[in-house]
Image (cartoon, rainbow, N blue to C red):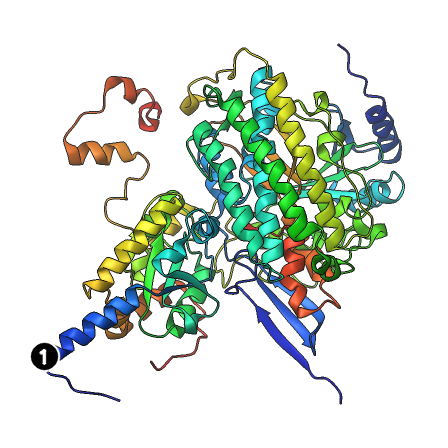
Amino acid sequence: MREKETTIYLGPQHPGITGNMMVKLKVTGDTIVSAETHVGYLHRAFEKLMEARTWLQCFPIVCRICVPEPDPNEENLSRVIEEIEGREVPERAKYIRVLVLELSRLATYLLWMGGQSGSMGLYTMPQWTVGDRDYILDLFEQLTGGRVYHMYIWPGGVRRDLPEGFGDKVLKVMDYLEKRLKDYDDLLFNNALFYKRAKGVGVIDKAKAQEWGVVGAPLRGCGIKHDVRIDEPYEVYDKLNFIVPTYEGGDVWARAMVRRQEFEQSISIVRQVIENMPGGDFYNKIPNPLNWRVPPGDAYVKTESARGEFGYYAVSDGSLKPRRVHARGPAYVHGVSLLERILQGANIADVSFIMNSLGTCPPEIER
Amino acid sequence: MEVKLQVENEILDKIKHTFHSAEVSIPRKQRVEVKLRNDLIHPFLAYLKDTLGFKHLSHISTVDWLEENEIELVYIVMNYDNLVEVIAKIRLDREKPEIPTLREFWPQIETYEREIHEMYGVNFLGHGNLTDFILEDWEGIPPMRRDFDTVKYAKETYFNRPGREDAQDVRTTITKKSGEEIPELAKVYSVRHLE
Amino acid sequence: MEVSYDKESRKIVQAIERFARKHSLWVLAYGTGCGAIEVPPTMTSRYDAERFGIRGAATPRQADVLLITGYLSVKTLKRVIRTYEQMQDPKYVIGFGSCTINGGMYWDSYNTIKLLDMYIPVDVYINGCMPRPEAVISGFIELQKVIAEGKAEGARKYKENLDWYRANQQKIIHNWNMPDYNW
């Protein structure tokens, strides 16, 4: 019997889709022949709104570009402004920024673990990891006042100093997460079902990976060792000891293994930061923010977010407001052109599985 | 402390040697900035990718220079071996922005070009799939162009909740309702006060 | 089948109906905006919304509550209207976050709607950007109260004023190619 080709619309209302987007699939049986992504459901015109706001007013906007992981956005925008303006950042502020970025990476990985196992029907894992993520969000709440959106990193430093006894609290949470990691191993990473399900699924060709614009954990999962924290050290990453794990295979399993090891590395970075935290100022004060002109110029800076290279290109024309701020999220490539390519030949049941492993984040694609 | 820019200078020399008309500069470590003639972007990126090994396309951005009647396209490519990023800039005529597509170099360029076409109205010749990407059934001028007034459009198109008309400074509404005065101290930080 | 009751027994039946409805709120899993990030913590172990009878449902036809988690772009609004019309009675809408109330920080955006209740009827609003899980749960409890009092009449309002809602919706959705549902 010849199998008929059918069109299936997955999303935007679908529990497996990571956010508000749609994938149009052409299938025969349950094998995908071709996939077409449809995005734009979350377009809020941030880049247009930023052109109508002063530089400092842009900060509440940029953190909303990527919902699960807002801090790299703030850090990037601060750093791009600092680079155009030539503003120095105190050493303590740099350490605090790294602390915030690594905590945010841990929180994102916890959410990812939940999503990854939830998309294959293992619902215990999200109950654990999303619950544990709240310990980190509580830290953020004490530090910044916000659970999800922090608006904490500013040009010239950070908004507030660390509260009293914050370091000990962070270390306590790190000890807890390290202990919990054993449980996660037992349930997910050493689970034969997960291995069988993930091995050989969503394979990215190693030879093509760089050309296709793959970044972050998916690139390291192809066995290529690249990390912005090493390639172009920002803040104080050049003073910290950590390794960049890689894994061969390029499939969902390889990405999971890379992230699993990075989770440990992040915990170690957080400990180093707390240990080496210098004293002094945390903020190089900017002038009256409503009358603050950034000199003309442009710059491109990037951060290693939990999902890959996060870049900001900003242009200033010397006025109160930015001429242009453009965010480049890893999901812009991963979630559209790469996803369409690696879904070919996959099984329908693996769509959200693969999307989770690539870290697709629709609000960052359309902004 | 003097920063050594050996790799950057080598790249600068190579580019200058091949493309005489290009303005090349090194803004900082790991960055090389190139300003090009419009018709050279195609051979330039081919040269970067195939000869100099700039395999990774980081970003394509667009800047609308309304006053100069030009649209600037910014291509940022990276070399994974020496970790340098080249920022290549070209300027198109704003009235009729047209440029051949570059999608044969990097497959993901297709997405960028679709978005730029939609948001700025730049026509990529030979692209073949310049359909709606983010917006749906959009009429009128491309929204990211600087002469498109988003406040006016939003006010005309959508219903607004009463009391939100003067959203520029919410404090005036609050003081009007409560009958209290803004303290002198706070007035310093008012946007209206500055203008 | 219509059964006619006298006034007294009708009251009792209604009370039982409302009691049952308010303790089984199945929320449609549709993350329309950034508020979707606070839904997993609400549903999982720490805040555990299931103790209030709140659970996720996969498809519109099985769901009772449409949680609009944040701003709606015009493109999403079209899908939300269709989703809402597919849902079966009883159905309730919760507007989640400041941006559904008055546009919030997107007040000048060309692509997001500013007033959700002009397009679909809203029973309860939860303010904040973004609302904490506690606020979400308190919003649901408010909805339960409204249901118990019999004031959650959004779906009826929508049916009675369909023309008015349609006119508002079609003002911004230019290409109206959606089916009409016969409830």
Residue A333 shows up from this direction:
no
* Residue with the most extreme left position: C7
Residue A274: quarter of image: top right
Give the camera-side residue of B109 and B41. B109
On screen, C135 above or below C5? Answer: above
Determine the residue positioned at 28% across, 35% down. Answer: B170
Q: Quadrant of the C terminus of chain C?
A: bottom left
Determine the residue positioned at 44% across, 29% down. Answer: A142
x and y percentages locating residue A100 in the rendered image: 56, 30
Horizontal side of residue B16 vs A121, given as left or right: right
On screen, C71 above or below A165? Answer: below
Indicate the secondary structure of the residue bearing disc 1: helix
Determine the residue positioned at 65% across, 59% down. Answer: A353
Residue A299: quarter of image: top right
Name the amino acid type tagged 1: Lys
On screen, A14 above or below A186? Answer: below
x and y percentages locating residue C105 in the rendered image: 39, 42
Q: Alpha-carbon neighbours of circle 1 within 10 Å: few (<14), some, or many (≥20)?
A: few
Q: Which residue is mark 1?
A: C7
x and y percentages locating residue C107 in the rendered image: 37, 46
Q: How many marks?
A: 1
- Mark 1 belongs to which subunit? C
Q: Quadrant of the N terminus of chain C?
A: bottom left
Determine the residue positioned at 62% across, 22% down. Answer: A273
Residue A255 shows up from this direction:
yes
